[in-house]
Amino acid sequence: MSFDNVCKVLAEKYPREFVSWLLAEAPTKVKVLKTELSLEPIRADSVTFLQTANRILHIEFQTRTISNPPLPFRMLDYSVRLIRQYNVPVTQVVIFLQETNNEIAFTEEYVNETTTHRYRVLRMWEQEPALFLDNPALLPLAPLTRTSSPQRLLSQVAQSVARISDRNTKQDIAAYAEILAGLKFEKGLIRQFLSEDAMQESVIYQDILQKGQQQGKEQGKQEEAFRFLMRLLTRRFGEIDSSIIERIQGLSTEKLESLGEEFVDFSDISDLVNLLDQQENS
């Protein structure tokens, strides 16, 4: 399956998500139209037409910049045929998948002596990854987005794939992501992160990392509460016996904070010991 054909499959399988992304609207109904148009029919594997209530979204996925006829003229041709056939406004978006400096990837209009026709161009390598990582329908495109760290991006893609609950969907999205990642990364690097075993390890590692971060934050709070209480105690009672310090140090953040609140009522170090005894027995 070719790179642009993978995108066509995604757009036709998840039309609502692509309309939401490219038209910035939440459609109530989306219809996938046939890609063959009348008047000397033309057909392209990378083209998808999605019809909403009052508009057609024409998506063109591109990995090449050279075509015959040239892309700008082809966009005009499609637009005229779509309007003639369906009599509704047409929004056209060309999505370039592979990074290039060719001017055609930065051209958004067809111009001749009598006609100017405009369309949108999206260059995947300029897109921020967050939107794609958070949406399973768009996730296979995530490897093509902007990054300064290929390993980090592929790891994030693997984690997002691993979180998909339905096994069949997970396998399909992983396969599409692996294919599209081939436009940008070496096979070895892709397999390192996007094989099934690697993705499983990645999500387990992420879970461990998050738990470790939570534990670290809790430990930091406990240490801060301990140091604060010890400052209060030494100011009032002077040097504290090491056995009492050990008992205090083993308390949770909540119990340390509770001791701090009770501190104002302490008249002697024995009051502290009695309260420690009560907490340990409770």
Image (spheres, rainbow, N blue to C red):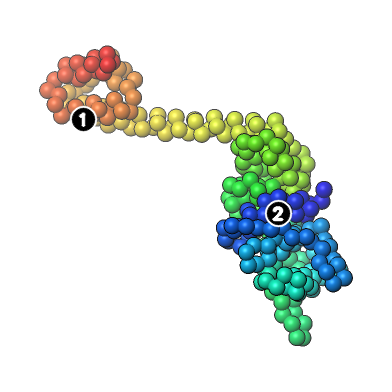
**Which sits in the foreground, 175 or 241?**
175
Residue at left offset 68%, top offset 34%: 167
**Which sits in the foreground, 226 or 64?**
64
The total number of labels drawn is 2
Dot 2 amino acid type: Ala
Q: Which mark is residue 11?
A: 2
Residue at left offset 27%, top offset 16%: 282
In the displayed structure image, the side of residue 266 where residue 30 appears, left or right: right
Residue at left offset 74%, top offset 82%: 115
For numbered disc 1, what is the local secondary structure? helix
The x and y percentages for residue 148 are 63, 50
Q: Nearer the viewer, mark 1 or mark 2?
A: 2
| Residue 129 versus residue 271 in the image, above or below | below
| Residue 52 versus residue 111 in the image, above or below | above
C-alpha distance separating marks 1 and 2: 60 Å
Residue at left offset 82%, top offset 61%: 44
Dot 1 amino acid type: Glu
Name the quadrant containing residue 205.
top right
**Which sits in the foreground, 151 or 8?**
8
The x and y percentages for residue 32 are 72, 57
The residue furthest left is 267
Name the quadrant containing residue 128.
bottom right
Q: Which mark is residue 261?
A: 1
Task: Say which label, 1 or 2, has the lower sequence index.
Answer: 2
For label 2, the crowd category at 10 Å Cα-Cα, with few meaning under 14, some 14 to 19 and many 20 or more, is many
Q: Is residue 190 visible?
A: no
For label 1, the crowd category at 10 Å Cα-Cα, with few meaning under 14, some 14 to 19 and many 20 or more, is few
The x and y percentages for residue 159 are 62, 38
In the displayed structure image, the side of residue 262 where residue 20 appears, left or right: right
The x and y percentages for residue 161 are 65, 40
Mark 1 and mark 2 residues within 8 Å of each other at the beta carbon: no
